[in-house]
Structure formats: C-alpha cells, structure tokens
Amino acid sequence: MTKNKSLIAPAIVAGVVFLVIAVIYWVDTAHALPSFFPGHSSAPSSHHHVKHGIAALVVALGCFVFAWFQSGPKTAEPAT
C-alpha cells in the first residue's frame, strides 16, 4: 500500500464529520433531522434512525483507521 501523507488530514476531517452525523442520527428524531439527511420525515415522528447512525459510525471508524495506516512509516524495516 502506498502511503500518501496528504490524505491524513482529509481522512480525519471526514471521520469527524461522519462521527457528528452518527450522533445527530442517534439524538434527533426523524422529524428533527435536517431535510437533506436520508430518513428525514416531514410528519411528526418519534422514530430514531439507529441503523443510519451505526453506518455513519462505521464509516467514521474506517476513515480514522485509513488515516492511521497512512501515518505509518513509508517502508518496513528489515528484520534482524
């Protein structure tokens, strides 16, 4: 896997954004979600989109893991 140090910051920013999205899905009801979020309902509802929040959390964790692997050393050290 080639390392690209310039991808670390965008991956961390994307991870934080998806983490915030996950929290919004868990805290707000379907009616209170922003209108551009999938699962928004214009009718009053007490439904929370837990699965959408879990999916956003998984994507956030994937972004953080990607950034972590990109921050490692460029080449492996030879075993002695």
Image (spheres, helix red, strand yellow):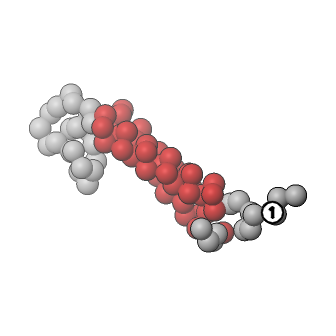
Q: Work out whether 22 lies above or below 18.
A: above
Disc 1: which residue: 77
Q: Extreme front residue here?
A: 80
Across and down, in percent, residue 30 comes to 23, 37
Q: Residues within 10 Å of mark 1 (few under 14, many from 20)?
A: few
Viewport quadrant of the C terminus: bottom right
Residue at image position (30%, 37%) is: 51
Q: Is residue 20 at least partly visible in the picture?
A: no
Q: Is residue 26 at least partly visible in the picture?
A: yes
Across and down, in percent, residue 54 comes to 37, 39
Q: Work out whether 44 lies above or below 2.
A: above
Residue at image position (39%, 46%) is: 56
Q: Amino acid at mark 1?
A: Glu
Q: Is residue 80 left or right of residue 68?
A: right
Assign a secondary structure to mark 1.
loop
Badge count? 1
Across and down, in percent, residue 13 comes to 54, 57
Q: Is residue 27 left or right of residue 47?
A: right
Residue at image position (43%, 50%) is: 59
Q: Work out whether 30 lies above or below 5.
A: above
Residue at image position (59%, 68%) is: 1
Q: Extreme top residue here?
A: 46
Across and down, in percent, residue 77 comes to 80, 63
Q: Extreme right residue here?
A: 80
Judging depth in this view, the residue of 9 and 29 nearest the camera is 9
Which of the 4 image quarters holds residue 47? top left
Judging depth in this view, the residue of 54 and 45 nearest the camera is 54
Which of the 4 image quarters holds residue 2? bottom right
Q: Is residue 64 left or right of residue 33?
A: right
